[in-house]
């Protein structure tokens, strides 16, 4: 079973892991990827996420820290899986930070929804400026946009 940046949005990590491990056969493998909580894209998304939090119902509990290797390992092991963790990276590029933001605002579901909600609230321009500043601060290319985001892949084997 594979979850590519998907299960990280489940409201209950314990239940999600238990169910994923339940449906794979003994000896079956589970792969879960999650962004590490660092870098310019993480900061960019944190700014938008915090602004969105003011305009949605309160969550019950906190989000599970999938991107922290130790917490992900402990969760999977608690459910009886043997765990290995690897790391990777993904490079995002665009002609500029603004072009990358515009692409997200018009085609990525989270970008479209957050732009609409924050625009109605009258805070979008300010939030957008702060998010772009975080992205620009971590930009690796002075003539365009290049930012590297690291992620983990937890490889779990059911017993």
Image (cartoon, grey):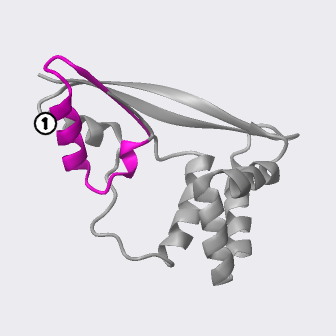
Q: Position of residue 36 (x, y in %)?
A: 46, 41
Determine whether 158 is above or below 19 in the image.
above
Determine whether 132 is above or below 75 in the image.
below
Q: Position of residue 96 (x, y in %)?
A: 83, 46
Q: Residue at position x 59%, y 55% from top? A: 109
Q: Residue at position x 65%, y 61% from top? A: 112
Q: Can you tell which quarter of the image residue 82 is in?
A: top left
- Residue 123 appearing in the image: no
Q: Secondary structure at mark 1?
A: loop
Query: In the rendered view, does 159 fall on the left or right side of 114?
Result: left
- Residue 150 appearing in the image: yes
Q: Residue at position x 69%, y 73% from top? A: 124
Query: In the rendered view, does 122 fall on the left or right side of 80?
Result: right
Query: How many numbered circles are shown?
Result: 1
Q: Residue at position x 80%, y 37% from top? A: 141
Q: Position of residue 101 (x, y in %)?
A: 73, 54
Of 75 and 137, nearer the camera is 75
Of 43 and 4, nearer the camera is 4
Of 48 and 113, nearer the camera is 113
Rate crowding at label 1 as few (under 14), some (14 to 19) or many (20 or more) other CA atoms within 10 Å.
some
Which stretch appears magenta? Answer: 6-34
Is residue 145 found inside the magenta-colored segment of the image? no
Q: Which quarter of the rendered picture does the N terminus lie within? A: top left
Q: Position of residue 158 (x, y in %)?
A: 17, 24
Q: Which residue is mark 1?
A: 79
Determine whether 66 is above or below 58 in the image.
above
Single out the residue that lies furthest toward the right: 143
Query: In the rendered view, does 153 fall on the left or right side of 105?
Result: left
Is residue 23 found inside the magenta-colored segment of the image? yes
Q: Which quarter of the rendered picture does the C terminus lie within? A: top left
């Amino acid at each position: 079973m594979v979850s590519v940046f998907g299960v990280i949005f489940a409201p209950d990590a314990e239940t999600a892991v238990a169910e994923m491990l339940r449906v794979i056969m003994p000896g079956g493998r589970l792969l879960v990827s999650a962004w590490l909580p660092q870098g310019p894209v993480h900061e960019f998304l944190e700014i938008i996420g915090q602004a969105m939090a003011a305009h949605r119902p309160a969550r019950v509990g906190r989000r599970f820290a999938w991107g922290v290797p130790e917490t992900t390992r402990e969760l999977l092991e608690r459910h009886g899986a043997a765990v290995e963790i690897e790391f990777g990276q993904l490079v995002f590029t665009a002609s500029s930070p603004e072009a990358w933001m515009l692409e997200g605002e018009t085609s990525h579901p989270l970008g479209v929804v957050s732009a609409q909600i924050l625009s109605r609230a009258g805070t979008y321009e300010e939030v957008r400026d702060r998010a772009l500043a975080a992205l620009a601060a971590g930009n690796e290319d002075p003539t365009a946009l290049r930012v590297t985001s690291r992620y983990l892949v937890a490889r779990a084997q059911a017993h």
